[in-house]
């Protein structure tokens, strides 16, 4: 397992704390060390095992990802998120929920304004 830690600004995250867990063995911690000054790290994993890599930065920032090590192949990331068919309402982004609520409130306002306009117009015709 070879990687490089970066900050969200794109700068390399040198010296940050790296923990590696073997999820094939019950999520057992198998290594912990500081990334190099240039943010790079390396761990010799076992073929057929899945590893969870956690990198901890200053101010409580961290990232976790999982990788599978396969014989004769490069490691590939394991998809940790639910598949779209398994996603539920709780998985919707906040901006979408707020947007739908605002759209519904706007529609209700237009409906009530139109209803009041029609009442006033109808009352004017009956007078």
Image: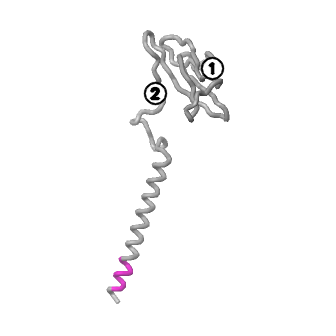
x and y percent of residue 34 in the render?
65, 21
Disc with the residue nearer the chain's start (1 vs 2): 1
| Colour option used | one colour
For image coordinates 58% across by 30% down, the residue present is: 11
Give how far apart the Cα atoms at labels 1 and 2 are: 27 Å
Element type where label 2 sits in the image: loop
For image coordinates 43% across by 59% down, the residue present is: 104
Give whichever of 70, 3 is nearer the camera.
Answer: 3
Please state if 60 lies on the left or on the right of 90 as rendered.
right
Residue found at the very far bottom of the displayed protein: 127
Give whichever of 88, 20 is nearer the camera.
Answer: 20
For image coordinates 45% across by 15% down, the residue present is: 74
Looking at the image, do the residues carrying marks 1 and 2 touch, with CB atoms under 8 Å apart? no
Q: Is residue 119 magenta?
A: yes
The secondary structure making up most of the magenta span is: helix
Residue range corresponding to the magenta coloring: 118-124
Give whichever of 40, 111 is nearer the camera.
Answer: 40
x and y percent of residue 107 in the render?
40, 63
Query: Where's the C terminus, which quadrant?
Result: bottom left
Task: Mark 1 vs mark 2: give the one in front.
Answer: 1
| Image: 98 above or below 105 | above
x and y percent of residue 33 in the render?
65, 19
Q: Classify residue 59 by image quadrant.
A: top right
For image coordinates 58% across by 20% down, the residue present is: 40
Counting the numbered discs, the total is 2
Q: Residues within 10 Å of mark 1 (few under 14, many from 20)?
A: some
Q: Which residue is mark 1?
A: 36
| Image: 54 above or below 48 | below
Q: Classify residue 125 by image quadrant.
A: bottom left
Element type where label 1 sits in the image: loop
Q: Which residue is mark 2?
A: 79
Residue found at the very far left of the displayed protein: 125
């Amino acid at each position: 397992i070879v990687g490089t830690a970066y900050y969200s600004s794109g700068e390399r995250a040198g010296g940050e704390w790296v923990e590696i867990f073997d999820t094939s063995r019950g999520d057992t911690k198998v290594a912990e060390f500081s990334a190099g000054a240039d943010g790079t790290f390396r761990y010799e994993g076992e073929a057929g095992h899945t590893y969870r890599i956690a990198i901890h930065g200053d101010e409580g920032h961290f990232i976790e990802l999982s990788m599978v090590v396969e014989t004769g192949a490069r490691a590939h990331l394991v998809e940790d998120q639910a598949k779209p068919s398994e996603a539920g309402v709780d998985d919707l982004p906040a901006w979408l929920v707020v947007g739908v609520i605002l759209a519904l409130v706007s529609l209700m306002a237009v409906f009530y304004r139109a209803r009041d306009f029609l009442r006033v117009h109808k009352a004017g015709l009956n007078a």
